[in-house]
Structure formats: structure tokens, C-alpha cells
Amino acid sequence: MTVDRVSVALFGAGRIGKRHGRTLAFDIPAAELSIVCDVDETAARQLAADLRCDRWTTDPADVFSDPSIDAVVIGTSTNAHASLIAAAASAGKHAFCEKPVALDLESTDTALDAVTKAGTILQIGFQRRFDKGFAKAKQMIDSGAIGKVESIRESMRDPGPPPPGYLPTSGGLYRDMTIHCFDCLRWLAGEEVAEVFAMGSNLVDPIFGELGDIDTSVVSMRFESGALGVIDNSRRSAFGYDVRAEVFGSEGAIMIGYSRDTPLLHLSPSGVSSDHVYWFLERFDDAFVAEMHAFIRSVQSGAPPLVTGADGRAAMALAYAAEASLKSRTPISPANF
Ligand SMILES: NC(=O)c1ccc[n+]([C@@H]2O[C@H](COP(=O)([O-])OP(=O)(O)OC[C@H]3O[C@@H](n4cnc5c(N)ncnc54)[C@H](O)[C@@H]3O)[C@@H](O)[C@H]2O)c1
């Protein structure tokens, strides 16, 4: 069955909720933003007003009991994801949910079971897969342009630590941040990871250590074919947000990523300079819009989502393996989780 216009409820009126809200309200003709829900009344009311949406609420029941709503977009703090996914599935509503699916694997599995039972669509917000550079690289790898993939490395560095209020419900570096890289490497390689070896440090801000977290990390991985992967992360990058990858194959390599914000270079006697993209919202602006278009298309057509709940679970299992490796100082298989 095809749906002409998809009525969507947005959960979460914070940083990412605002980004997805703008896309739903203004960028996708086939979508209609029907209501904004946030536990913070001021945030819900303000975002609804900014997006010219008539309805806002602090009560999720207003969404789940409304038969006119086809789908929900979940951009709340991570600790609320799993219960909202399950509630959406039980109400027969399709869901897009930000990464990670949940803070732990048990809640992830419970939420995914509810979706399977309901037969609804669930897409996870790994927007990197929709970035022009990463998507083109994947296409080239799959077409054999660089032969057999032998190693992949990716850097992901935030300009600075997230707001202090974000950290306690974030799940820590591997579940919150590296999870993007775990998904990305697994997707680019097109195969599963056999083992993970992680090293981490506290070099950026004592707050991470106080919360039992790390802020700097290198993770090495061996894929089932023997291909290798390396991910390095930092919660602080003096020059701005930085996401770059290189895929090295038997017949060539691909370098992915850019750093300029304005398409301008200043050439002078002292050298060549440009500005630098500051944050994920600018770097992945197009990808955030593209992933939402894909979700709405899936809901309209009934086609499976391009990033599934199982992808979300696989990335979380890799985060668990990295945490276990960090603790035990040995390589760990994600199949243990
Ligand atoms: N894909 C990406 O690159 C990316 C980037 C940033 C954040 N995220 C994810 O998005 C989510 C939100 O992050 P953020 O930076 O927007 O956080 P944020 O703190 O700015 O906003 C979260 C909002 O959710 C609201 N909220 C919390 N529990 C709720 C509930 N039960 N029902 C309704 N609203 C609730 C809070 O009041 C707040 O307004 C996190 O899961 C994070 O991992 C993804």
C-alpha cells in the first residue's frame, strides 16, 4: 500500500530534533510534521512554533493514541529511544530513531523484537551512509573499483565535548560516538567484524574520567575476510569537526571526507588557507536531509529501510566488544554479545 502524505510526530526538541524537524516541516513535500513532543514543555512549544507546527505536547500518549499519525521521528536523549521505539511499534507507527537504538543491548533487543512483531519500519540514524562522499565510496567499492578491500581507517573528532547535561545519558564514547564509525566500517567493508582491540585515554577533559568514560581512543578491528580496520576518535579537535576515511584495496584506494565549510581558498604569499567546518550539523547537513527523505520513501512505499534495526544492533555489539577489550586489554569478538 502506498501512502501519499506521511504524517509524522517528532520526539525530542534538542539539537538533533531541531535538525530533523526542519527537514520534516520544510524540505519533504511528502511529509507533514503534525506534532512535536518533548518532556521539556518550553522546548516543545518553542520548536513547534519555529516550525509552524500547530501541535505540541509533553505526553507521548497524545502521539500514540492518534490514528492520523503514520510515523514518528525519535531524536530524544538516548535513554528514551528504546521505549519510544517499542511504543511506536505497538501503536502500528513506523519509526526513524537516532543512533544508538538504546543505551544497552538488552533494551535494543526488546525494542527490535517489538518492531519485528508489529511489522513496522524502523530506520536508524546513521546519516554517514547518506553523505555524498561516503555513499559514492560504497558504490565504488561494491562495483570493484578498488579491488578487494584490505584495510579501512577512519578518524572522527568532535570540536569539543558535548554539553555536560548530555554526557550522563550518552552511553559513553563507544556507544555514543564511535558507534557511527563501527557502522560505517562494517557497511563499507560489506562484512562482519571478527575481533576488536581497543585502547583509550583521558586527554581532553577530566569530566570524562569522572563519569568512567574515555575521550580519546584507537580501535583496531579484523574483519572475517582478514581485512583490517582502524578507528581513531577524540572528543576535542582544535580545528573543528573532522570525519575522514580511507579505504585501501588490492587495486586502488579511496579517500573520503572534506574539511572546508565555505568553498573558498585564500592564496597569498604566505600560503593557501581556508576555513574549516565546525560541527556535525554543517558537515552532514545534506546527509541528515537525505536520510529523512529515504525514511519517508520507505514509509510511502513499504520498502525496507536502508539502515535497519539489525545494523543498529551490530554497531552496539561492536561498542560492547570495544569496551570489553579496553577493560581486558585483549582482542574481543563481537559475536560474544
Ligand atoms: N546522528 C548524529 O550525528 C547525531 C548527532 C547528535 C545527536 N544524536 C543523537 O540524537 C539524540 C539527541 O541528541 P541531542 O544532541 O539532540 O540531545 P539534546 O539534549 O540536545 O536533546 C534531547 C531532547 O530530548 C528531550 N527528551 C528527553 N527524554 C524525552 C522523552 N522521553 N520524550 C520526549 N523528549 C525527551 C529533552 O528534553 C531534549 O530536549 C541522542 O540519542 C544522540 O545520540 C545523533
Image (spheres, helix red, strand yellow):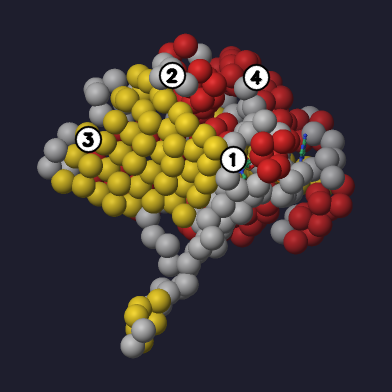
Q: Which residue is mark 1?
A: 202
Quarter of the image for residue 231 reads: top left
Mark 4 vs mark 2: give the one in front.
2
Q: CA distance from mark 3 to mark 1?
A: 32 Å
Judge left or right: residue 106 versus residue 76.
Answer: left
Coordinates of residue 112 in the picture (x, y in percent): 58, 20
Coordinates of residue 118 in the picture (x, y in percent): 60, 19
Say if disc 4 is inside 8 Å of ligand 1.
no
- Residue at 29%, 31% in the rendered image: 228
Q: CA distance from mark 1 to mark 4?
A: 28 Å
Toward the viewer: 297 or 14?
A: 14
Disc 3 residue type (three-letter): Val
Toward the viewer: 111 or 252?
A: 252
Q: Which residue is mark 2?
A: 330
Say if disc 2 is inside 8 Å of ligand 1.
no
Q: Is residue 185 above or below residue 116?
A: below
Tag 3: Cα neighbours inside 10 Å, few (<14), some, or many (≥20)?
many
Quarter of the image for residue 335 reads: top left
Coordinates of residue 233 in the picture (x, y in percent): 49, 43
Tag 4: Cα neighbours inside 10 Å, few (<14), some, or many (≥20)?
some
Sequence-earlier tag: 3 or 2: 3
Say the numbered circle drawn on residue 107. Answer: 4
Ligand 1 is located in which of the four quadrants?
top right
Q: Which residue is mark 3?
A: 149
Disc 1 residue type (three-letter): Asn
- Residue at 34%, 80% in the rendered image: 271
Mark 4 vs mark 3: give the one in front.
3
Disc 2 residue type (three-letter): Thr
Pointers 4 and 2 in contact (C-beta within 8 Å)? no
